Amino acid sequence: YLCPEPYPEPNSEFLRSHGIRLFQFGIEGNK
């Protein structure tokens, strides 16, 4: 479920933690 509104705080925490993992994974894959 996606909405154009800003994410609520709990969702921001989720995206922040998983976003960092995806970001690091992407860097590892691009080396």
Image: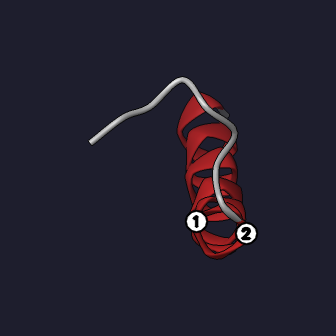
7 vs 24, nearest the viewer: 7
Q: Which mark is residue 28?
A: none
- Image location (x, y in percent) of residue 6: 69, 39
Q: Residue at x 58, y 71 (%)?
A: 14
Q: Residue at x 58, y 40 (%)?
A: 26
Q: Which mark is residue 11?
A: 1
Q: Quadrant of residue 12?
A: bottom right
- Image location (x, y in percent) of residue 10: 63, 76
Q: Secondary structure at mark 2?
A: helix
Q: Is residue 3 left or right of residue 26?
A: left
Circle 2/circle 1 CB separation < 8 Å: yes
User: How does the figure colour the protein chain or chains?
Assistant: secondary structure
Q: Which mark is residue 9?
A: 2
Quarter of the image where the C terminus is located: top right
Quarter of the image where the N terminus is located: top left
- Image location (x, y in percent) of residue 23: 67, 47
3 vs 18, nearest the viewer: 3
- Image location (x, y in percent) of residue 29: 53, 39
